[in-house]
Image: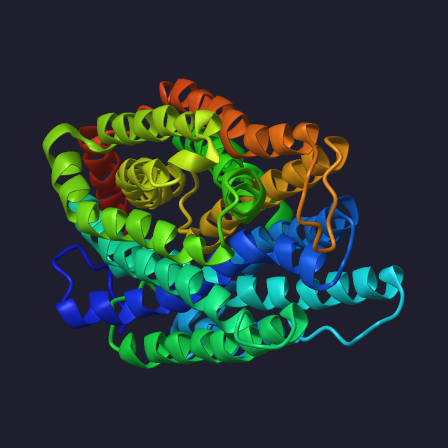
């Protein structure tokens, strides 16, 4: 169905679209929480080599995201500009994820690094094929300022459930086998199949969802992507989101090391800990929707960023004997993260109309491709930064049970201090964002008047 949807979406449309986020969240959760751990502990790679093996594919993939978005902008298909890629990408990224965690028993570290790089490139590219067009559907399914927040709210609830599922299921699966390598291989099969199934559910249930069919006419993708830099609200959000994701990438990558070595806890604690955060985030997503409607998206985003910034510090001072207090920290962090994810992802669709007013083109794909580029660069930078800190602090991988005081300090810095600084930077940057609801409605009205003039001309 081709339409400019400005009314309320049906519950079926919202839920059907959001289901795809379950598999996406599992992919993101496992890559953030366990990929570095998998390479250092299950495959015995030094942290710096493992970090590099993950960094290169993430950077290549991030560069590909804006192009994937621009490609979907130009696509003409009976399935729509986006759903075709949701179908193909769902199949490919689940299979490639499985391959990455099924590394053969190579004897040399270089062979392991080479396999990891190639397999992760394939998984990352397939992930982009699915997720960039999927995300661009946010701006197509409705053009209502507040309805977009509700739509993203459903997606964020699904994201929380997916993260909880990944954090609980992955350690249970990899611990169920005789070796970590075998355990991660089984996790790849189970979770990869789940990703594909949830993506296919979204493909079939969004068949009648509203969409906008105005393929971009520009012949230059490079020129189109460069034009996004003139979209001031988008640029500000991009920088805020970049800091946010570097912080998340650093803390999430360090979590398993922090619990295992600094807090001397079993890896199985990850599941319950992230479940507390995930449940808090799920429960508080609807209240954040209401708060954003009451005080505006930008002020609400300031508040959620401040919570994340403050809650980054307490774990730095926690000794192993006070591990239970970490559950309280994660409870409050989950409340802040609910707002951070909801508000950033509901604000970025609003910048599509700013771009359309300036250029006359609707480039949801290119814009959300750049948004995905921001997310992945942030996650990659955070994870790679952690690998460098671990390496420089003298961390010993390969199953070592004891670490030096310097290594333990490096873990705590990666988990707490680096994220704190990045959250603070995000708060400062958000001060320069100026697109509120009144301004958005002015922009949308100007676009409608221009369209009406073009029709009557």
Judge left or right: residue 69 versus residue 287: right
Q: Is residue 255 visible?
A: yes
Residue that appears at 46% across and 55% down: 365
The answer to which quarter of the image holds residue 18 is: bottom left
Residue 54 position in % (x across, y down):
69, 53
In this view, 298 is above or below 54: above
Q: How is the image coloured?
A: rainbow
The answer to which quarter of the image holds residue 225 is: top right
Judge left or right: residue 8 versus residue 112: left
Q: Number of labelled discs? A: 0
In this view, 80 is above or below 4: below
Task: State the residue lying farthest toward the front.
Answer: 321
Q: In which quarter of the image is the N terminus?
A: bottom left
Most foreground residue, 443 or 203: 203
Residue 299 position in % (x across, y down):
23, 25
Residue 431 position in % (x across, y down):
36, 18
Most foreground residue, 248 or 425: 248
Residue that appears at 46% across and 47% down: 367
Residue 366 position in % (x across, y down):
50, 51
Judge left or right: residue 10 versus residue 159: left
Residue that appears at 69% across and 48% down: 55
Q: Is residue 70 visible?
A: no
């Amino acid at each position: 169905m081709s339409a400019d949807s400005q009314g309320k979406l049906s519950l079926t449309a919202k839920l059907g679209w959001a289901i795809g986020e379950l598999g996406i969240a599992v992919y993101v959760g496992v890559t953030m929480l366990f990929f570095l751990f998998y390479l250092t502990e299950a495959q015995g790679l030094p942290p710096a080599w493992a970090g590099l093996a993950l960094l290169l594919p993430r950077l290549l993939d991030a560069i590909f995201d804006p192009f994937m978005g621009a490609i979907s902008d130009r696509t003409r298909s009976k399935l729509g500009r986006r759903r075709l890629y949701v179908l193909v990408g769902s199949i490919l990224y689940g299979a490639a994820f499985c391959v990455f965690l099924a590394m053969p028993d190579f004897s040399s570290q270089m062979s392991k690094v080479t396999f990891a790089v190639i397999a992760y490139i394939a998984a990352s590219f397939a992930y982009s094929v699915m997720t960039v067009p999927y995300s661009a559907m946010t701006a197509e399914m409705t053009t209502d300022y507040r309805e977009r927040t509700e739509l993203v709210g459903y997606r964020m609830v699904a994201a929380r459930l997916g993260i909880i599922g990944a954090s609980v299921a992955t350690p249970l699966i990899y611990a169920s086998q005789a070796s970590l390598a075998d355990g991660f291989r089984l996790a790849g099969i189970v979770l990869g199949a789940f990703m594909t199934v949830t993506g296919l559910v979204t493909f079939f249930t969004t068949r009648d969802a509203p969409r906008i069919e105005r393929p971009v006419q520009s012949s230059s993708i490079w020129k189109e992507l460069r034009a996004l830099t003139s979209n001031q609200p988008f640029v500000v959000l991009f920088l805020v989101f970049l800091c946010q994701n570097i912080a998340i990438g650093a803390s999430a990558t360090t979590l398993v090391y922090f619990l295992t070595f600094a807090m001397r806890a079993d890896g199985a604690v990850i599941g319950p800990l992230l479940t507390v955060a995930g449940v808090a985030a799920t429960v508080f997503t609807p209240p954040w929707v209401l708060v954003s409607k009451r005080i505006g998206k930008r002020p609400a985003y300031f508040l959620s960023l401040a919570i994340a910034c403050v809650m980054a510090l307490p774990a730095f001072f926690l000794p192993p004997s006070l591990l239970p207090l970490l559950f309280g920290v994660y409870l409050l962090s989950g409340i802040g993260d609910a707002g951070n994810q909801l508000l950033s992802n509901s604000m970025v669709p609003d910048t599509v109309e700013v771009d359309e007013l300036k250029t006359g083109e609707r480039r949801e794909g290119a814009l959300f491709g750049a948004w995905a580029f921001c997310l992945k660069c942030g996650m990659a930078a955070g994870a790679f930064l952690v690998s460098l800190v671990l390496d420089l602090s003298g961390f010993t991988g390969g199953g070592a049970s004891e670490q030096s005081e310097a290594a333990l300090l490096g873990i705590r810095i990666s988990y707490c201090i680096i994220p704190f600084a990045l959250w603070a930077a995000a708060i400062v940057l958000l001060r320069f964002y100026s697109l509120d609801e009144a301004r958005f409605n002015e922009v949308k009205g100007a676009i409608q008047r221009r369209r009406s003039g073009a029709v009557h001309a």
